[in-house]
Amino acid sequence: MIKTIKEQFLKIKKHQFLFEELVKRDFKKKYKRTALGMLWSLVSPLMQLLVMSVVFTHFFGQNKPHYMIYLFAGNLTFSFFKDSTNGGMNSLMQNSSIITKINLPKYMFLLSKNVASLINFGLTLIIFFLFVACDGITFSFRFFALIYPIICLIVFNIGVGLILSALFVLFKDIQYLYDIFTMMLSYMSAIFYYTDTYSHRTQVLFHANPIYVYITYFRDVVIYGYIPGWKTHLLCFGYACIALLAGALIYKKYNYKFMYYM
Amino acid sequence: MTKIELNDISVSYITGDFSTIGLKDVVIQKIKGQYKPKEFVAVKHVSFKLEEGELLGIVGSNGAGKSTLCKVISGIMRPTTGTMAVRGNIASLLELGTGFDGDLTVKENTFLRGAMLGYTREFMNNTYKAIIEFAELEEFEDRLFSHLSSGMKSRLAFSIACLVNPEILILDEVLSVGDGAFRKKSEAKMLEIIKGGATTLLVSHSLEQIRRMATKVLWLDKGNQIAFGETKEICDRYAEFLNGK
């Protein structure tokens, strides 16, 4: 196991130049031919936030303290997940003309998409912390704990992306199904509502949703001022591992079958 | 030393399962009891051996399985049955014109393609100018790739690809790009690499080119290996076959 991981790392190192070029391409292409260009990675989450906060504070009367940050944390995390996995899903098919002509590790294309999304997420994160500062929350060393759920989420996204991209090659309908699935997931992730009024059992059930766990980690650290316990850490890690493992196994098994459907 | 050895290689594609005909038809066919995913065998029982420094010409009409065979040897596809041994690092240049990104500039595409072919950044920085010069695209460096003419595109593709320095070289319809002058230039360039000792597979529809360059010839027809052997003998037979059609 460790040996194969090491081999994979060597492989990535060997293709480092290609990887950098792919990341550049994916990031550039994202906003190519738009007037605002890269600014969109800042403007788009802000506008989403604006719409959501107007809707939920004015029409639904949410007025708990730091509601804006609560909303932002949820939206930020969920958008990263959605963007990353959607990009991952398309990564194989978009590059099919390359994959069928040149012998390259296929997951490179997926990873580069993920890195492009991560850069985007990083930019949004800066805005998030600006909001946090403006909302009167003082910074503390505790915030560094956020690195943990972010890393877990990155791994989780890669895993889900691997699974989706494989499915997408075999089964094009998945893009429509996944659209509906992410919509459902967004309602189940408590992005704009609070879960503390639900029964204990329902609250436990919420933790079956990986995205909810990652979002909660963010909120606990930033808004409620504590680092969650070991159970949450284990869950974060567990979900990421399961997704990555499942994705890696699918790739290992079907790696050469993809060709027939491209 | 034997560089490439293929024993009884067959490659089949699956056609007619749900991803090609759709779920509705699969269900209907299942109800009728007619459902069976068909296998399309693109390459059937091909065997040959190639020694170091040899140049194998592959001939055959469209759909003979030439490109599929190239994909198998370059490691992109796995053979369905049969065994093979390929010794040495491979550069396979298959249908060069594809896989570029129309939204990126010529320069960006050049670096990306160079990276795909396994060049280092250093190497690309040093040779970028030479590549553009060889492709005769000095004025187009910062244009979008999609704005180039198709001849220019393949010229660029060839110019990047021809810097490889492999032990095994696979060329699928690569030498027939650009106008007459460029074709001459590109063939000379390829000959240089081949003379450097690379074992080469050359797929070409130009029999004249095969006669001139190949040391061995493989003739495929609808996936079947019709003949493998000396250039002159098989080219003569193939020419006769073409005339008789």
Image: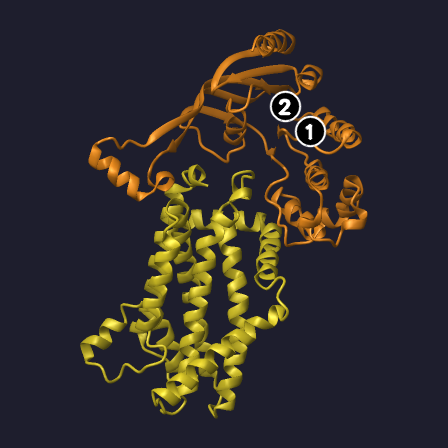
Chain colours: A yellow, B orange
Q: Residue at x 36, y 28 (%)?
A: B39
Residue corresponding to mark 1: B176
The residue lying toward the viewer, choosing from A29 and B163, is: A29
Q: Is residue A129 visible?
A: yes
Residue B29 lies left or right of residue A131; in this view the side is left
Tell me the number on the disc at residue A153.
Answer: none
Q: Residue at x 78, y 30 (%)?
A: B185
Residue B77 lies left or right of residue A20; in this view the side is left
Give the secondary structure at mark 1: loop
Q: Residue at x 75, y 31 (%)?
A: B186
Q: Is residue A229 above or below residue B155?
A: below
Q: Position of residue B14 (x, y in %)?
A: 38, 32
Q: Position of residue A87 (x, y in %)?
A: 47, 58
Give the secondary structure at mark 2: loop
Q: Amino acid at mark 1?
A: Ser
Classify residue A256 by image quadrant: top left
Q: Residue at x 36, y 87 (%)?
A: A59
Q: Position of residue A152 (x, y in %)?
A: 41, 66
Q: Residues within 10 Å of mark 1 (few under 14, many from 20)?
A: some
The residue lying toward the viewer, choosing from B216 and A142, is: B216
Q: Chain of mark 2?
A: B
Q: Amino acid at mark 2?
A: Ser
Tell me the number on the disc at residue B204.
Answer: 2
The residue lying toward the viewer, choosing from A79 and B92, is: A79
The residue lying toward the viewer, choosing from B68 and A227, is: B68
Q: Chain of mark 1?
A: B
Disc 1 and disc 2 in contact, CB within 8 angstroms = yes
Q: Is residue A208 above or below residue A5?
A: below
Q: Residues within 10 Å of mark 2 (few under 14, many from 20)?
A: many
Q: Is residue A222 visible?
A: no
Per the model, the C-alpha gap separating discs 1 and 2 is 8 Å
